[in-house]
Image (cartoon, rainbow, N blue to C red):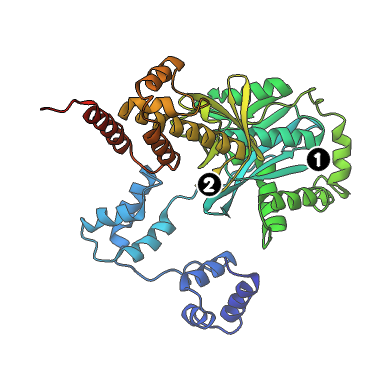
Amino acid sequence: MIPKETEAEIVRLYHGERWPIGTIAGQLGLHHTTVQRVLRDTGVDPKIVAPRPSMADPFVPFIVEQLEKYPGLRSSRLFVMIKERGYPGGPDHLRRIVSRLRPKKPAEAFQRLRTMPGEQGQVDWAHFGKLQIGRAQRSLWTFVMVLSYSRRLFLRFFPGASMPFFVRGHVEAFADFGGVPRVLLYDNLKGAVLERHGDAIRFHPTLLAMSAHYRFEARPVAVARGNEKGRVERAIRYIREAFFAVRSFTDLADLNRQAAVWTTTAAIDRPWVEDRERTVRQAFEDERGILLPLPSEPFPAHERLEVEVGKTPYVRFDLNDYSIPHDRTQRTLVVFADLQQVRIADGNDVIATHVRSWDRGQQLEQRDHLERLADEKRRAREHRGLDRLARAARTSQAFLPPNVPGFSCAARADARRASAANRSWAAVSWVTLSDHQPAPPSLQWLCQGNDRSRRVRAAPLAL
């Protein structure tokens, strides 16, 4: 579209200055068909502005016939069809002719819908680009709910559009309104409608559970009929233009704080569309008392995920690893998460609680989890070393301190009687063992060497 001032200039130059269409187009930097359209709209005789004869004229009846049968047929396909029939021109010229000959959809009039206070609300998601959090790049989505009567709106930004965020948006919107509208309109988004064939609709089970909890009716609009929820569509455009444009924020929490302030100040104090002398705040005060009351407890809005834990004491959730006690590995655990916290449960026991990270590839650990695992591994290493020593040199058991675990009293007594004469090498071997330096084969050689030397000294001399 061109400005109204340019259209007025075209009319003045054509009628007042008697400029030809080509001159007007060249001087104003417009295409000649744009000048022709403006003159045609002002009532100029079509014969005067009729286009010149074209090489596509012999093919016009064929093009019109095909467009009547197939109104959505693309000009690229028509170009191939008439090229096979001898059309000598190019695709760009044909594209302009097809756009002029294509049947126009008849203009559709819409009746303005009015709703009673507290009767209806409209819900939708809006995408606002990407959000960089550390190394993770997440989609920035906005949950928007509008009360159809007062135009009171609620918005909350989320790093995704999954079902848990969808539910949380409802819960926070109802709490912000102080009540629930009787009917909520949705388009056919996955959070509301899983499958649809005509009037046969399969709703998301979580949405049905939430609607039963808050006692409202979930009602999807017809397919490709966005005008049926035009209030939320206009509210999203209003948010883009009046709030989000050139908005700076530090993180998601800061953006939501700014949104909460904006919805309770500038957005609620704007003129009410039904009566410009009143504000949305005043209309909402009329509607607030008619909304359905809130239940005693809000609907649970946390994420729930069952995870399989391997050999390492970590649970993978939403691109990050969260530590758990080392004795809870190799089993199925349940993760409960909200926007701030991650809780990990084994049955009815909550075994770990972490602050939620929206980054990716992070290891979030609790100090006591690591300390207990390190202590367990230290004791295991001590047991493993003593077992290797016992297998390599059985007589070494007699010289271990009494508080060293892993050996029975009977085994120590047997070893002590078998090596009562070897106190000197025992002292040396225990000092060496305490330094954690020799390998078990070395100690085995030491013990066996002492036994051999004792047998040599006890043998009689041969005469």
- The quarter in which the C terminus is drawn is top left
Name the residue at 66% across, 52% down: 237
**Residue under label 1:** 150
Name the residue at 33% across, 53% down: 63
Q: Label 2: state its secondary structure.
A: loop
* Residue 307 at x, y percent in the picture: 49, 29
Q: Nearer the viewer, residue 235 or 227?
A: 235
Q: Label 1: state its secondary structure.
A: loop
**Residue under label 2:** 362
**88 over 68 or under it: above or below:** below
- The quarter in which the N terminus is drawn is bottom right
Q: Which amino acid does label 1 sit on?
A: Ser
Q: In which quarter of the image is residue 242?
A: bottom right
- Disc 1 to disc 2, C-alpha distance: 45 Å
Q: Earlier in the sequence, mark 1 or mark 2?
A: 1
Q: Is residue 451 left or right of residue 161?
A: left
Q: What residue type is labelled 2?
A: Gln
Answer few, some or many: residues within 10 Å of disc 2's Cα (few below 14, many 20 plus, some between 14 and 19).
some
